[in-house]
Amino acid sequence: MVQDDRIGKAVERIRRGTLDEKHEAVRDLGRIGEPAVDPIIETIVEETDNDLRWYLSQALVKIGVPAIEPLILSLQILEDDDARRYLAAALGTIGIPAIPALLDLLAHEREDVRGFAALALCRIGQPAVEPLLAMMDETDGIAHTCAALTLWKMGELGPEALQDYFKRKKE
């Protein structure tokens, strides 16, 4: 109960506080850790204020690894694309620890889920390149295609890696 109070107060400080109060509230949520993950995700889904959603996604980043599994699950079950963009951005900012779970989502049956996973992997950037190339070697079908398309969307580093990959395959 005390924890729920702290979470609610932190969300209110983000909603109504000064810039410094918002940043401190994000740090507070990060310190609460795993118990704050589900309430934060619920608030991101329920709210339409994009500022609030952004700050809450930053709190999920501060929580880090304990937030990965609930974020992955949320990407799969939620229907609100706006909320899922913030959740995917959080996963992308968490970075390297989220890569294996995001790669698994590239084989998901739903195209939209694959798209949000690709978005997060693109945000991770360079650290995701080798795992994506390995996925192309180890899979076929939709997972292979999604890995290639994700690399293609990464800007310079992805297409260069794809070029090298296909050159090696020819040799």
Image (cartoon, rainbow, N blue to C red):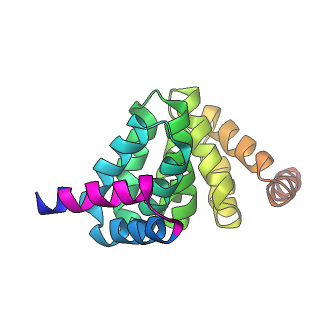
In magenta, the rendered stretch is: 5-19
Figure check: 142 above or below 38: above
Figure check: 27 above or below 111: below
Please check the rendered image and state whether residue 96 is part of the magenta-colored stretch, yes or no: no
Figure check: 110 above or below 65: above
Instruction: Give the residue displayed 19% in from the left and 58% down from the top.
Output: 5
Instruction: Give the residue displayed 44% in from the left and 68% down from the top.
Output: 21
Which image quadrant for residue 126? bottom right
Please check the rendered image and state whether residue 13 is part of the magenta-colored stretch, yes or no: yes
Residue 108 position in % (x across, y down): 50, 33
* Relative horizontal placement of residue 119, taking residue 54 as reference (left or right): right
SS assignment for the magenta stretch, majority: helix
Where's the N terminus, which quadrant? bottom left
Return the residue found at the far left.
1
Residue 155 position in % (x across, y down): 83, 54
Residue 147 position in % (x across, y down): 67, 45
